[in-house]
Each structure stands twice: as structure tokens, then as C-alpha cells.
Amino acid sequence: MKSSSKHYLTAALIIAAMGCGGGDGVITMTTNADVVRFDFIGSASPDIETTGFPQTTINFNYGGSGTITIEWDTSYDQAPRQITITGGKITALYCQNNQLTALDASQNKRLTNLDCANNLLTADALNALFETLHNKGGTINISGNTGSAGCDTSIAETKGWRTVERFAEDRMKVEEIENYADAFPDDLITISKAQDDIANEHHFFADSQQGADEKIMFHTKESIQNFAYMEVNHSEDNDNIVFHAGEALFVIDDFSPEKPLVVTTTVAGGIPNRGILFSYRGVVKYFYIRESGEDGSLFLVEFSQPLIIEN
């Protein structure tokens, strides 16, 4: 779908928009650029509101990704300019190289991957951004910003976020990130079909998806932070299926071996649409749920959230 429209908005309208619709995810940013372009992953086309009179184009692929381009007329639209993104259930936002001076994700609880590299964010602006992040964990790339070296990344890391601040300086490769993440025990989280009668204390969540009549159980060998049972979305890339973390449906801040999670859901057949994420030793892991076609047993398959890295 491609749409193009003019926006005639005031700061008052932007403030009103931020106050309503936070449940569907609101992200705001301020830029000095005349043209901005950013990519996103979500389940719907978001609404875009701005100051001034820009031309806004949204290209949305119903497989779950899209690109937004905003261009101001410099003859009467002066910087700085504010952008508000509402809705779309955005889980990943790639807004690098847009001369951003401020970024606020405080009303988006689904975001798990944020790439805001090579902008004009000072240390104070980055610290303010970290404060707005939710506490369910994710990955944020802040490399190449004005304040990358002087900001306090521990603000984000204590919430389970992995901060990447040195891509532009040492050209960290994808393999290094993968090696860093390989510190996880293979069987840290296990999944199995649950019995009808469960005597031990446990967390419980009833999934609302159609046909959710099967009980499954998650166990952990060690206490982990920011565990979430979540939706899993997908898109197609050259005939390959690419999985993306969706909305967190049930969150456990501290998931312990003594108290497993029981979920009433359905996992049989089709493309996987449910999974888990969790933070362990500062790294976030993502898995979708599959059922064996041979014996009906359940297992978890790891997938990686898309992360744009400049070579």
C-alpha cells in the first residue's frame, strides 16, 4: 500500500495525540533534517503526525514491514521538527542517519529493536531516551551519535536492553554479536505439554487466540529477567520466512525455576505465531514455538531480530 498526504498540524495536536493511543504504541522524535526516512516492523500501517507542512509517504508491506519518508518544504518549514508515530504495533524501528536531536519511546511497550545510530543525540538526550524504554529488554544501536561515548548505558541495561555504541568506531561484525550471545545454556528454557492437574505453584496465562485449548509449560533452569510470552509475526524475504517479535502477551519480571509458566494456547500446524523472549546476562533471546510432526512434542526455535549494521 502506498499513501501520500499533506499534514497541517500544530504542537497542540501533537500533544493531544501523545495523550491518547499510548496503548497502541507512540514514538516521538525531533529532527533538524529536511528529509527523514526510517524503516519499521509492525503488524499495521502506523499514523504519522508532524509539525509543519511536509509531504509524507508510507509504503507498508502487509507481511509486516514498511518505510516512511517525510519531506519538508524548506521555504516555510524551519527546523527543528517533531514527528509522532502512533499505532502499527511497531516492534522494530530503524531511524538512523536522520539528524535526530530527541527520541521518546515511553508509550511503546512492544519495541524490542531500535536503531538510532548516526544522529545528533547528545549524552543527555540518549540518557533521556534510555529512561523512556520499557523494562522487557531489547537491542538499541546508539553508535555514531554526539553523546554515544558519554551517555550512561546502564540506564537501559538495567531494563534488560543491550546497548550497541561502537559500530561506527570499531566496525563490530555480526559474528562477534552472535558469539557474545552464544553464552546461553542450550536447555536454559524448556517447553513441554502440561498435565491437566498441576500441583506445583505456577504462573498462568490463557491465550485468546482461536482454538487455544492446549496447556503447555515453560521451565527455566536459572532465574532470568524480563521473560515474555509473545506474539510472533513474520514476513517474506526472497521466498524465505523471516520471524519478528510481536506484542508481549504475558510478562514475568523475574522468572524462577521454582515457579513455571503454564499457558493455554494452540501450536499445531501452520506458520508459528507464538514464542518467548527473555533477558539473560545482558542479552535478549527470541524463540518461536514448534510442534514435532513425528511425536507431537514441543520445542523452541531461536530467531534473530533484524539489526541493521553498517559495514
Image (cartoon, rainbow, N blue to C red):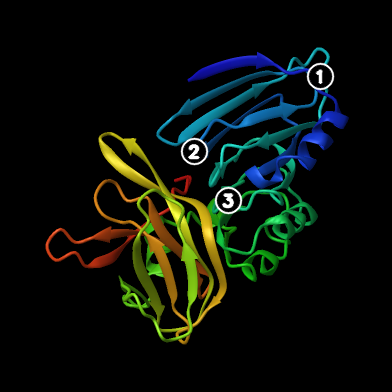
The outermost residue toward the left is 294
Residue at disc 3, secondary structure: loop
- The one nearer the camera, 11 or 103, is 11
Dot 3 surroundings within 10 Å: few (below 14), some, or many (20 or more)?
many
**Residue in the picture at 58% in, 55% down:** 140
x and y percent of residue 284 in the render?
Answer: 48, 65
What is the three-letter code of the residue carrying label 1? Answer: Asp
What is the three-letter code of the residue carrying label 3? Answer: Leu
The numbered disc on residue 77 is 1
Q: Is residue 25 above or below residue 223?
A: above
Label 1 vs label 3: CA separation? 30 Å
**Residue in the picture at 37% in, 48% down:** 243
x and y percent of residue 109 in the render?
Answer: 62, 53
- Frontmost of labels 2 and 1 is 2
Question: Taking 296 as reference, is 266 left or right?
Answer: right
Q: Which of pointers 1 and 3 lies earlier in the amino acid sequence?
A: 1
- Frontmost of labels 2 and 3 is 2
Pointer 3: what residue? 111
